[in-house]
Image (cartoon, grey):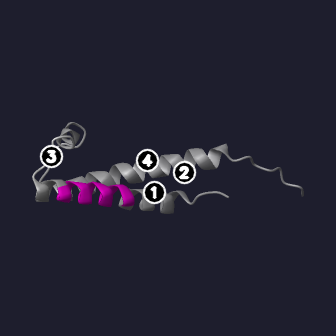
Amino acid sequence: MQLNAKRFALASGVLWGLALFVITLVAASRGVGEHIRHLNTVYPGYAVSYFGSAIGFVYGFLTGAIAGFLFSVVYNGSLKQEPDEG
């Protein structure tokens, strides 16, 4: 069964974006997050704050979508193609 690359990319982007959004919101509301603040080296402008959670969602969506698309393309390419009998 092949994966639909566009749909898989969209789902991966939303999942990673929401995960980063929620993790940042929880960390910002509790005043913790020293371990995730290092994400600003990968995502410029990201911070453990309420505004940073929105920035994290955008970055998370983009990187998740790219990773999901690449994964689905590699997965689909690795499937064994059966020869046509016609």
Quadrant placement of the N terminus: bottom right
Q: Secondary structure at mark 1?
A: helix
Q: Earlier in the sequence, mark 1 or mark 2?
A: 1
Q: CA distance from mark 4 to mark 2?
A: 9 Å
Q: Residues under labels 3 and 2: Cα distance?
A: 29 Å
**Residue 29 - label:** none
Query: Residue 10 sits in which quadrant?
Result: bottom left
57 sits left or right of 5 in the view:
left
Query: Which residue is at a point 49% across and 46% down the rendered structure image?
Result: 70
Sequence-earlier tag: 3 or 2: 3
Residue ID for mark 4: 67
Which residue corresponds to mark 2? 72
> Would you name the residue on which mark 3 appears?
45
User: What separation in Å lies between label 1 and label 3 (alpha carbons)?
Assistant: 24 Å
**Residue highlighted by disc 1:** 9
Q: CA distance from mark 1 to mark 4?
A: 7 Å
Residue at 80% of width from left, 50% of height from top?
A: 82
On whether residue 45 falls in the magenta region, the answer is no
The amino acid beneath tag 2 is: Ser
Choose the circle earlier in sequence order: 1 or 4.
1
Across and down, in percent, residue 35 comes to 20, 40
